[in-house]
Image (cartoon, grey):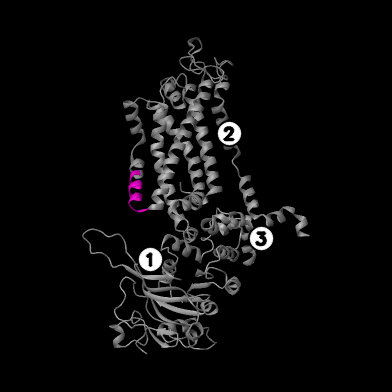
Amino acid sequence: MAVGADPGAARRAVFPAAARMWARLRRLPLLPLAVILLTILVAVIADQLVPYDPERINPRYAERPPVPFAGGMWEFPLGTDRLGRDILSRIIMGTRISLGVAACALLLGSLVGTALGIVAGYRGGWIDVIVMRTADAFLAFPGILIALVLAVTIGPSFWVVVAVLALILWARFARLVRSEVISCKNRDFVALARVAGAGGTYIVFHHILPNVINSLVVLCTLQVGWAIIVEASLTFLGAGIPPPTPTWGGMVAEGLNYVETAWWISLLPGLAIMIVVFAYNLFGDWVRDVLDPHLRNI
Amino acid sequence: MTTARAPLIEARNLRKYFRAGVGLPFLAPRAPVRAVDDVSFVIGAGETFGIVGESGCGKSTTAKLLLLLERPTAGTIHFQDFDIAVATKDELRRYRASVQAVFQDPWSSLNPRMRVRRIIAEPILLNEPHRKKEIPGVVADLLRQVGLEETMAGNFPHEFSGGQRQRVAIARALALRPQLIVLDEPVSALDVSIRAQIMNLLKEIQDRFGMSFLLIAHNLATVRYLAHRVAVMYLGQIVEQAEAEELFTRPLHPYTQALIAAARLLRPGEEPPPVLSGDIPSPSAPPPGCRFSTRCPKAFGRCFSEAPAPRELAPGHRAACHLY
C-alpha cells in the first residue's frame, strides 16, 4: 500500500504546514548559527573566559606572534600587542562590546522606528509626511559625520555609538514598518474588524502588529552585521568607544602602524569582525527566507 | 408584486464623491469622482437585495457606505427607527452589531496570524465581551452551521481552501446574529464548482435565521439565484430596480437589457447579441443627460440633454429611462 510504503507521506498529507516547516528547518545554516550562539555565549560570560585582564600591560611579552609562528608561546595563543596585552583576552572582551552595542542600538532603533512607522502608516496624512521626511533626512545624513561631531563635542563613549547607530536604524525600521502597515491596513480583515466595531488601537495590536512582526525580526537580524561593522569603523576612526576598552575596531586601528612587523594585532580582530558579520548576514538571509520571502530586496 | 416586508434599512439619496488627487495650489481643483450619485433603496427584513453592475459602477462603495467604512457625502441611511448620521453612540453600537459583512477575497478577509476560533469570535469579543466564556461553544456551533468541523477552530487560515475560508468568513459574519449581512461579491473569487455550495449555504442560513442580505455582484446568475429584488447600477446611479424574476424576464432599461443579453449562453449557430460599444465614461465627468446615453443603442435627442428620473413603470418596478 502506498501509505505503508512511506509513512512520512501520510504525515505530510495530514500536516502540510508542519512538513513545510520541517523542510525549511533542514536548510538551517548550522555553521552561522553556531558562530552566533558561540559569540553570544562568549559575550555573556566574557569575564569568566578571559585568561588575562585584557587591559593589563606587560612590556616583557610585547609583540608576541600567535602560537604557530616563531617566537609564539602557549601562554598567549593568539599573541600579544605592542603593550604586551593578550589578544585572545581582548577579542573575547571585544565580543561583548560589539554585540552589546549592536543589541542596544537595535533595541532602541527598532522600538522608536516601529512606533513611528506604525503611526505614520496607519494614520497617514501630515503625520506620515513629517515622519517619513524626517526619516529620509536621517538616512541621507552621513552617520560617521554625526559620530565624529558627537565624539568631539561630548566625547566618545559606548552610549554615543549606540545613539548614532539608533539614529540611523530607527529610520530604516520606520520605513519598512510604514510600508508593511500600509499594505496591511488595506486588507479586508482590517475593514471587517472595523465593521465589527474595533477601534484603532485594537486593530494595530491585534491585526497589524502580528503581521508586521516577521519583517521586524528579519530586519533586526540583517542589521546586526551592519551595526557591528559601523561600530568597528567608528572606533577605528577614534569616534567610537575610547581606549583602553578592548574593541575589535579599536584593535585593528592600534595595529595598523605595525602591520608589516606585527600583522596579527590588526588581522585577528579583523577576522573576528568578518566571521561574526558573515554569520549574522547568512543567518539573517535564512530567517528572511523562512519568515518573509517577499523581503528579498532588503 | 410589491414587497410586503417591513423595511429594515433605507438609503435615501446617498452620494459619495471622492476627491481626485491632491489639490495643488494655483491649479483648478480636479472634479471629484462621483462613485455613488443619488442612490436610494430599501431593504426589507429577511430579504436579499441584489445590486449588479460593471466594475466601477459604485456598487462596492454603496456597500462600504452601509458598513460605515465610508462617510456619505450626502444622503441618509435609516436603520429601524434611527438615522445613522445623527445616531447616538449606543444606537451606532447597535447598528454595528446588527450589520456584518462577507467580502470577495477570502485570502484577504481572514487575518493570517489569527486562529479561526479568534477570527469567528472577534465580533463577540468586541461587542459582547461579557459572553467570553460561551465562546468555545458558540464557535463550535457556528462552524457546524457553515458546514465545517468543530475541530478546525484551532487552525490558521492558510490551512483552508478558498471555499472553506469563505465559510469561515460567513461563520464570523453570523457570530452576532446580525439583521443584515452585506455580501460583497461573496462567490466571485471562488472556483465555479465551489460557488454553488456557498450560494446554497447562504440561502440555508437566510432560511434558518431570517436576516436580510445586501448582495453585491457583477455576475447576473449569482444575483438571479439569490436575490429577491435587484437594482442595476450604472455610473453611480441605480438605473432599474425590480423583483428579481420581473427584472430578468422583463428588463426595461436598455442597459439592463444589454447586460442580460451579454450574459446569456448562445445556442450553436446563433448570432451573438449586439455588444455595448465604448467604455464607461469617467465618473468624475459623467455625460450630461442620461449617463448611459453615450453607449445606449436606443438613445434619442432628449437623452443627451435631460437626465431621466426613476419612475415606477410597473408595480415595484422602477426604471430611469426616457423610452417609457
Q: Are marks 2 and 1 on the same chain?
A: no
Residue at the disc numbered 2: A37
Q: Nearer the viewer, residue B23 or B92?
A: B92
In what element is the residue under mark 1? helix
Decide if residue B298 is on the left or right side of residue A252. left
Work out whether residue A89 or residue A80 is closer to the camera in this orientation and state it: A89
Q: Nearer the viewer, mark 1 or mark 3?
A: 1
Q: Residue at x 57, y 15 (%)?
A: A73
Q: Secondary structure at mark 2?
A: helix
Residue that badge 1 annotates: B85
Which amino acid, by three-letter code, is at mark 3?
A: Glu
What is the magenta range? A124-134
Quadrant in which the N terminus of chain A appears: bottom right
Q: Residues within 10 Å of mark 1 (few under 14, many from 20)?
A: few
- Residue A115 visible within the image: yes
Residue type at the position of mark 2: Leu
